[in-house]
Amino acid sequence: MQVIYVDSLFCLNLLTDYLLCLTAGRICGLRLRRWRYLAAALLGALYAVAVLLPGLRFLSLPAGRLGCGICMGLIAFGAERQPLRCTGVLLAAAAAFGGALWAVSSAVSGDACSFSVPLSLPVLLLSFGVFYALLSGLMRARRLLTERRRVRIVADLGDRKAMFLALEDTGNALADPITGRHVLVASPAALRPLLREYTSLFEELSPVELLEALSADPRLRGRFRLLSCSHVGGSSLLPVFRPDRLTVEGTKTEDLLIAVSPHAHGEGYEAVL
């Protein structure tokens, strides 16, 4: 008969779930909120103990596991811009780590057909080390690829100047149908030196309301208009403007407009060219 110690089970799951939340946060390029990750891990550890208690075995059903994973994700990433996306990354990381744990356990036991994984601390740490090393290698390769594709942008509007990095994306075919100019899509944060107190409005107001608010400022009046943008999820309207001066890697260009979108950012860049 297998004996399971509740304290060991709780601590192992607490450590595992915390490391998984931390890993998901790194993959998503987030500012790490360790207290939230610890709270999510605490829920996961309590769930691991609860499924072994009499009368609560139903929690181990797939629906219960999925529900616990989603709740953990919302606790860990509820304050982020895309909590559901981050939760999906957490679930994927958990599945990948489960596979790594099974592989290491099979290698240690010599039984590749066994799906019974001993949750001992050495096996757990070795499995996470292998998983994290592979993940770090993938992220490093992605970072090197991204760095080769980033360009420095300097935009001037009146006496204001904004400098940021843009990711060159060959899939960005957004262009102004009237002038034919290509459109660079930047996040409000990248344009904060130009937009100042209006930066937060790009996430709070509808496109039409946004243009009305911007027109109240003499510096920005008449600068912005709306451009229709088609994407996988449908279509939307983006506020777009032409800066007084814009350079790409130090080279001045006259054929580039700037659209503003809260989603135009990622790890190491704040715009998409």
Image (cartoon, helix red, strand yellow):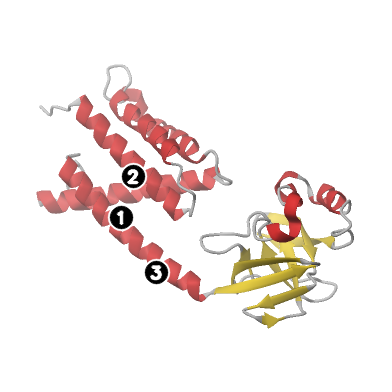
Q: In this view, does 229 lie above or below 248?
A: above
Residue at 17% across, 40% down: 120
Q: Which of marks 2 and 1 is nearer the N terminus?
A: 2
Toward the viewer: 187 or 169?
187
Q: Alpha-carbon neighbours of circle 3 within 10 Å: few (<14), some, or many (≥20)? A: few
Q: In this view, does 156 lie above or below 12?
A: below
Q: Hey, which quadrant is residue 205 in on the image? A: top right
Give the residue at mark 1: 132
Q: Is residue 54 visible?
A: yes
Q: In this view, does 230 lie above or below 69?
A: below
Residue at 35% across, 24% down: 58
How far apart, in angstroms, are the residues tagged by discs 3 and 1?
A: 14 Å
| Left or right: 241 as drawn, with respect to 273 | right
- Residue 97 point in image, percent of width and height: 31, 49
Per the rendering, the mark at residue 141 is 3
Residue at 25% across, 56% down: 130
Q: Hey, which quadrant is residue 164 in on the image? A: bottom right
Q: Which amino acid type corresponds to the residue marked 3 in the rendered image?
A: Ala
Q: Alpha-carbon neighbours of circle 1 within 10 Å: few (<14), some, or many (≥20)? A: some
Q: Hey, which quadrant is residue 13 in on the image? A: top left
Toward the viewer: 91 or 7?
7
Q: In which quarter of the image is the N terminus?
A: top left
Give the residue at mark 2: 19
- Describe the element under mark 2 as helix, strand or loop: helix
Whether label 3 touches label 1, CB < 8 Å: no
Q: Earlier in the sequence, mark 2 or mark 3?
A: 2
- Residue 16 point in image, percent of width and height: 30, 41
How far apart, in angstroms, are the residues tagged by discs 2 and 1?
A: 10 Å
Q: Which amino acid type corresponds to the residue marked 1 in the rendered image?
A: Tyr
Q: Which amino acid type corresponds to the residue marked 2 in the rendered image?
A: Leu
